[in-house]
Image (tube, helix red, strand yellow):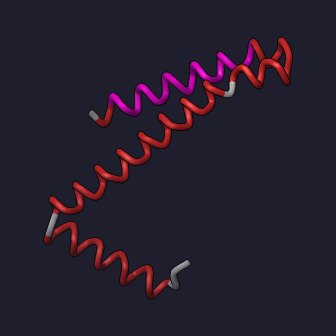
Amino acid sequence: MLSKEDQRRFDEITRQLRISDPDFVARLSDRVQARRGRLLLLLTVILWSAVPAVVVIGGWVAAVMAPVVLAAASVLAWRVRRLHH
């Protein structure tokens, strides 16, 4: 955690960088968003691969709930990837 003075200085540096090199800031922002999209996709794949185990362990309630939750996660991942491409 930054002190108030360090946070103020960091904000000042960030503001100067946005003014002096907006292309760099845009590329950095794109990389963060791409990483977030990849992590969401990976999480969705892992969750889908866990469905059989959840069904065996949790029974019929899990068998009904898991696909609904995972379908929602898949739709969210699809929307995030669509927004970034």
Measuring from the top left, give residue 56's x and y in whole percent. Answer: 82, 19
Point out the residue furthest to the bottom here: 5
Quadrant where the image shows the N terminus: bottom right
**Rendered residue at 61%/23% (across/down):** 70
Q: Residue at x 28, y 49 (%)?
A: 30
Q: Main secondary structure of the magenta part?
A: helix
Residue 34 position in % (x across, y down): 35, 45
Quarter of the image for residue 15 reads: bottom left
Q: Quadrant of the C terminus?
A: top left
Q: Is residue 79 magenta?
A: yes
Asked where in the image residue 6 lies, by quadrant, the reply is bottom left
Residue 52 is left or right of residue 49, and the answer is right
Residue 27: x percent and y percent?
23, 55
Q: Is residue 14 left or right of residue 63?
A: left
| Number of marks drawn | 0
The segment highlighted magenta reads 64-82
| Rendered view: 79 above or below 84 | above
Residue, x 30% and y 36% (percent of image)?
A: 84
What residue appears at the point 49 percent right and 22 percent down from the top-left corner?
75
Above or below, 9 relative to 33: below
55 vs 80, left or right, is right
